[in-house]
Image (cartoon, grey):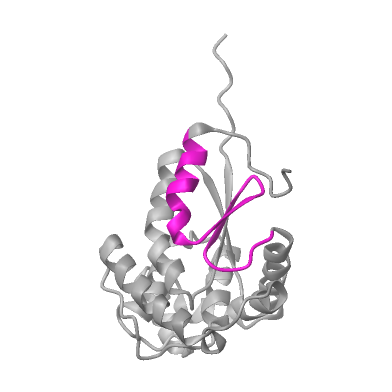
């Protein structure tokens, strides 16, 4: 008898539409998941409350050296990833709730969210669109063949808002404190600059590392 194939592994992907790092890591992590045959669960999450719960600071409250270093890193990583990212986009910061909840509405409606996520993220950081406007979000969905007006309307429903809040609880329970975070078997890989380490973990098949090892 031939051996039973191993079940696909599952990766929990916590992200925010307002995060440039989410955008920079989106295509690479999806390519990684496809290469390893990983099942991805998508969790849009509000960063502000997560920061507040885990000791992080919003950008405007960080020390000036940290703010300046962030700009350097964005320039380095846009070159590394080969994307035309604007480090000072015209319509940022913005409230990412509706964009995130539209992605969540698409998932709940049974649509694959990957193309919509890419279009929304690039809308902020490449096209400099105002993703705080519902009509702009609807146009992003339309552009990838999804029913934009319908999804934006669904995004405002109590059910979707409750799921978005639930994602925050899931993030905190998983020790997630920023976006993007990729969680494999309980092991958190924070940031798009950890994708190579995630690749190593999937390639080796090793057991997840634990934070409480003496």
Q: Position of residue 61 (x, y in %)?
A: 56, 88
Q: Position of residue 74 (x, y in %)?
A: 36, 73
Q: Is residue 196 above or below residue 204?
A: below
Q: Position of residue 27 (x, y in %)?
A: 37, 58
Q: Which region of the structure is painted magenta?
A: 175-203
The front one of 165 and 196 is 196
- Which quadrant of the figure has residue 108? bottom right
Q: Quadrant of the N terminus?
A: top right
Residue, x 67% and y 49% (percent of image)? 186
Q: Number of numbered discs present?
A: 0
Residue, x 52% and y 84% (percent of image)? 59
Residue, x 57% and y 83% (percent of image)? 58
Residue 194 lies in the magenta-colored region? yes
> Is residue 15 toward the left or the right of residue 185 in the image?
left
The front one of 37 and 183 is 183
Residue 15 lies in the magenta-colored region? no
Q: Quadrant of the C terminus?
A: top right
The front one of 65 and 82 is 65
Q: Position of residue 26 (x, y in %)?
A: 42, 61
Q: Is residue 124 above or below residue 31?
A: below
Residue, x 37% and y 68% (percent of image)? 144
- Which quadrant of the figure has residue 206? top right
Q: Is residue 135 above or below residue 190?
A: below
Q: Is residue 7 above or below residue 27?
A: above
């Amino acid at each position: 008898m031939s051996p039973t194939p191993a079940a696909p592994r599952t990766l929990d992907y916590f992200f925010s539409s307002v995060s440039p790092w989410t955008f920079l890591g989106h295509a690479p992590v999806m390519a990684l998941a496809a290469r390893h045959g990983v099942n991805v669960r998508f969790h849009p999450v509000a960063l502000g409350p997560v920061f507040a719960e885990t000791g992080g600071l919003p950008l405007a409250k960080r020390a000036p050296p940290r703010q300046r270093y962030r700009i350097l890193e964005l320039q380095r990583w846009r070159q590394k990833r080969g994307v035309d990212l604007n480090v000072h986009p015209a319509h940022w910061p913005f409230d990412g709730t509706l964009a995130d909840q539209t992605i969540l509405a698409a998932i709940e409606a049974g649509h694959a969210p990957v193309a919509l996520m890419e279009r929304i993220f690039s809308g902020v950081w490449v096209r400099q669109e105002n993703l705080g406007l519902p009509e702009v979000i609807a146009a992003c969905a339309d552009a990838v063949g999804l029913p934009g007006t319908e999804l934006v309307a669904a995004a405002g429903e109590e059910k979707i808002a409750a799921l978005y809040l639930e994602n925050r609880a899931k993030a905190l329970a998983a020790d997630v404190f920023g976006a993007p975070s990729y969680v494999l078997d309980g092991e958190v890989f924070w940031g798009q600059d950890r994708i190579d380490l995630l690749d190593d973990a999937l390639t080796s098949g090793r057991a997840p590392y634990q934070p409480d090892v003496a």
